[in-house]
Amino acid sequence: MEELRIQNLGVIADATLPLDPGLTCITGETGAGKTMVVAGLGLLFGGRASRAPLGADRALVEGRFAVAEAALELRERAIEAGADLEDGELLLARSVSSEGRSKAWVGGRSAPVGVLAELGELAISVHGQSDQMRLLQPAEQRAALDRFAGADHGKVLDAYRAVFHELGACAAELSRLRTSAREMAREADLLRLGLDEITAVDPQEGEEAELAEEALRLENAEALRLAAATAHGAITGDPATGEGGATDTVGAAARALEHDAHSDPKLAEFAERLAEAGALLAEAAVDLSSYLDDLSADPRRLEEIYQRQAALKTLYRKYAEDLPGVLAWADNAAKRLGELDVSDERVAELESQHAELTARAADLATQLRASRRAAAERFSNSVSTELKGLAMPHAEVVAAVEPRPAGRGSVDLAVETAVSGASEDGADEVELLLRPHPGSVPAALHKGASGGELSRVMLAIEVVFAEIGGPPVLVFDEVDAGVGGGAAIEIGRCLAKLARRHQVLVVTHLPQVAAFADRHLVVSKDTSGAVTVSGVRVVDDAARARELARMLAGMPDSHLGVAHAEELLAEAAKMKS
């Protein structure tokens, strides 16, 4: 981070902070706005936004970053958001209006605020007193140990969580089947009854129209028979009386024309047409005869049709208004029956699956505990080593990994030789303990450490985390609270050491820490009590000595105070070299 600009945030009206790649210390009198620097960074990287102060249209925070080629993940996410990183420079900005509306920019392009938060996770890590308090919570301590344990441990943790969630889903399904079996069985019975009724009727497409046509024919069979017989007699005549029919009349007409057709072609044409008419009448007579033979007035068949129509109407009344709807209901009912499988086989299958998942979760929880204990030993040794360089030579931090008591998780697992309560993070309780000196009993950090000791322990932990990777920019907001004297010098030396591998920003009230800075920024306020546009300035040489003298004794113009400050700066320079 090369530069940070803050406008209208808290008491800062307009300030630009040029930052050093190594250790930058920010000092100033109480109320001058030092913590607004940390607040500005939080806002820039997606933190919760407050409204701009009264009298200002908006609060604005801008950051300019030099992104190294090695920061692949950060570069890819920024480019994905629309930033141009050809020159290796990334500009980020966040504004908040007086109405509380927030806007974000990445590389000069508008972007969701969530993108700033994602970039912040990759670029910067902020540590303040609130972070210290959070790290006192057991869940945070377990998460910190998991981060320290490394990638292989993370894979085991991910595998455990996947199995744990699968186990939870299986247990929920099994419980649902058991507790809802009665209701599900009742619904399944109703569905089966409906399917059985539809299957028994076995409706066929187009059947309704055919049944209606046949019923109409049977209902009017006598009238149809009389009409067909009359028409047949008219065509064929009556053999009993010898009376000829239409075929005889047409035949006679055709023969009469044929006799003289050779005299006039037109008569031949008429004769041919009458012959065709006679053939058609003969064919109609045959068809009418077949129709009369097939025509039935069977009342039993008519009753069958009525019963079939009634059965179809019953299906329409119960399941749908037409045949396609009934068939669709049957398909849906069959699918629902598969979901409502409450058979003993399904329960047994789930119970077997639950037992298998429980065994797998227990095995992974055992691996997780072994990995945590190995990491806890390394973590304890590393933090304790750092404490020796922070004026706590005999102190020891112990990362205790103990089984969680049974019944205190969402499920109990047999881990190692006992049953432990398990959650998605495993079956372990992790607690950081401090043994101030040999022979003392380790106690929880919040009980066994004073304010100054807690600050140094937390700093040692952050140094250990920094050594295993993490974001390139580290920000510390008064983590040296409650520390003074030689311990303050050791904290400064530790931060300077950390700045060899990371960019470090420190908001501090200790001159011993500020003396180690590669760049020293001072936040000052004007006579009215408000921070002016030029409220942040870089101090060097004499001005820096005067600022340290102010911090030492509140007397920046005291020759003795300045001499003491110069001596402190010289000593810090020796320690850094």
Image (cartoon, rainbow, N blue to C red):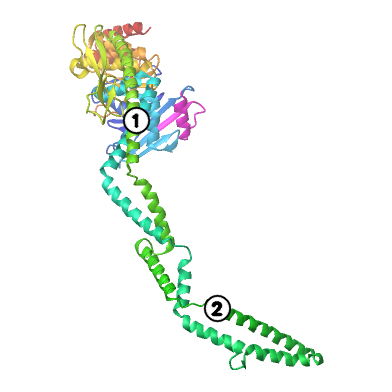
- Whichever of callouts 2 and 1 sits on the residue coming sooner in the sequence is 2
* x 61%, y 93%: residue: 243
Count of marks overlaid on the render: 2
Residue type at numbered disc 1: Leu
Tell me how far mark 2 sits from mark 1, CA to CA. Answer: 75 Å
Q: Is residue 112 above or below residue 329?
A: above
Q: Position of residue 542 (x, y in %)?
A: 33, 12
Near mark 2 (Cα within 10 A), the count class, few <14, some 14-19 or many ≥20, is some
* Residue, disc 2: 291
Residue furthest to the front in view is 240
How far across and down, in percent of the image, does residue 216 sit? 46, 76
Q: Residues within 10 Å of mark 1 (few under 14, many from 20)?
A: many
Q: Nearer the viewer, residue 143 or 132?
A: 143
> Which dot marks residue 456?
none
Q: Residue furthest right?
A: 263
Question: Which of the 4 image quadrants contains residue 433?
Answer: top left
Residue in the picture at 18% in, 11% down: 441
Taking 150 as reference, is 480 left or right?
Answer: left
Q: Please determine whether, in this image, residue 437 is positioned above or below residue 182.
A: above
Question: What range is drawn magenta here?
Answer: 71-92
Residue lying at 32% horizontally and 30% vertically, measured from the top left: 355
Quadrant in the rendering for residue 449: top left
- Please identify the quarter of the rendering in which residue 16 is found: top left
Residue that badge 1 annotates: 357
Expressed as whole percent of the image width and height from the top left, the position of residue 394 reads 24, 6
Residue 357 shows in the view: yes
Quadrant the C terminus occupies: top left
